[in-house]
Image (cartoon, coloured by chain):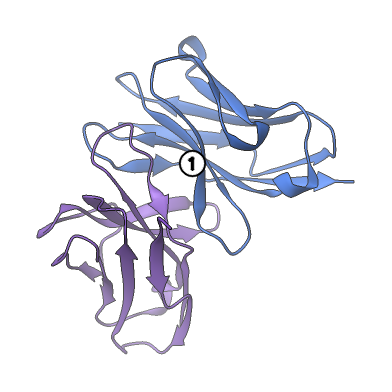
Amino acid sequence: AQSVTQLGSHVSVSEGALVLLRCNYSSSVPPYLFWYVQYPNQGLQLLLKYTSAATLVKGINGFEAEFKKSETSFHLTKPSAHMSDAAEYFCAVIKGGYNKLIFGAGTRLAVHP
Amino acid sequence: EAQVTQNPRYLITVTGKKLTVTCSQNMNHEYMSWYRQDPGLGLRQIYYSMNVEVTDKGDVPEGYKVSRKEKRNFPLILESPSPNQTSLYFCASSFTGQNQPQHFGDGTRLSIL
């Protein structure tokens, strides 16, 4: 069965520092993977998705993620954090032949001046 | 503007008093889904619908009902709410297909006293 593990429920970085949010998945077939961001009092917004076309996926707001099959990982990165990046980030995988999303528990990113 | 609209955004009510949370999308999506978000658990699917008059249980359906009489609407019904249903609820919609990203509403925060 598909599942998603996000390492670290809270991550804190300084403004301008590298952002690295970790996601590992378990899937018996090549997965469809997504990263979503949730700003305070808002719904989830799609950051990027992996659909097997390329292992390095670029998303909005300068984020990107690399699919590594050997490590079953899909970590999210951004070279330089901005204060506006403070939010909760969710990694998710599609289950089987349906649209069902399986979410990780989320990582809350704090950005300090 | 393409959007998923949930109402109400906030509701405080008492145990046993039936309530309905409405969800409407204007993107002609076939697939719609309800999630609840609880700290440390990410989002968990309650019910989903692949199209009009087609609904099915997600991972945590107990205590909830849904209907899909029209393509655009997918209300969530709590017939007899209990305190363990206090949560943040999200409606989402998408076209069918594993690589289709889901669009989320802004959420409904329910408190059951």
Shade representing chain B: purple
Residue depicted at 15% across the width and 53% down the height = B51
User: Residue B58: where, in percent of width, then height?
Assistant: 26, 52
A89 vs A76: above or below: below
- Image quadrant containing the N terminus of chain B: bottom left
| Vertical side of A52 occupied by B90: above or below | below
Q: Is residue B113 left or right of residue A62?
A: left
Q: Is residue B44 visible?
A: yes
State the residue lying farthest toward the right: A113
Q: Is residue B48 above or below residue A29?
A: below
Q: Chain of mark 1?
A: A
In the image, the chain rendered in blue is A
| Residue at (39% x, 17% y) in the render | A52
Q: Is residue B15 left or right of residue A71?
A: left
* Residue B10 place in picture, x, y as percent: 49, 78
Residue at the location (28% across, 77% down)?
B78
- Let me know if residue B113 appears in the view: no
Seen as rendered, the residue at the extreme top is A70
Q: In the rendered structure, which amino acid carries the disc numbered 1?
A: Gly
Against A20, residue B53 (above or below) is: below
Image quarter for residue A21?
top right
Q: Nearer the viewer, residue B69 or A102?
A: B69
Q: Is residue B105 left or right of residue B27?
A: right
Q: For mark 1, give the secondary structure.
A: loop
Front residue of A26/A46: it is A46
Local packing at callout 1 (Cα closer than 10 Å; few below 14, some 14-19, many 20+) is many
Question: What residue is pinned by disc 1?
Answer: A104
Residue A85 image point, x, y percent:
71, 44
Please tell me which residue is depicted at 85% across the width and 46% down the height of the picture.
A112
Residue A101 location, x and y as percent?
A: 35, 42
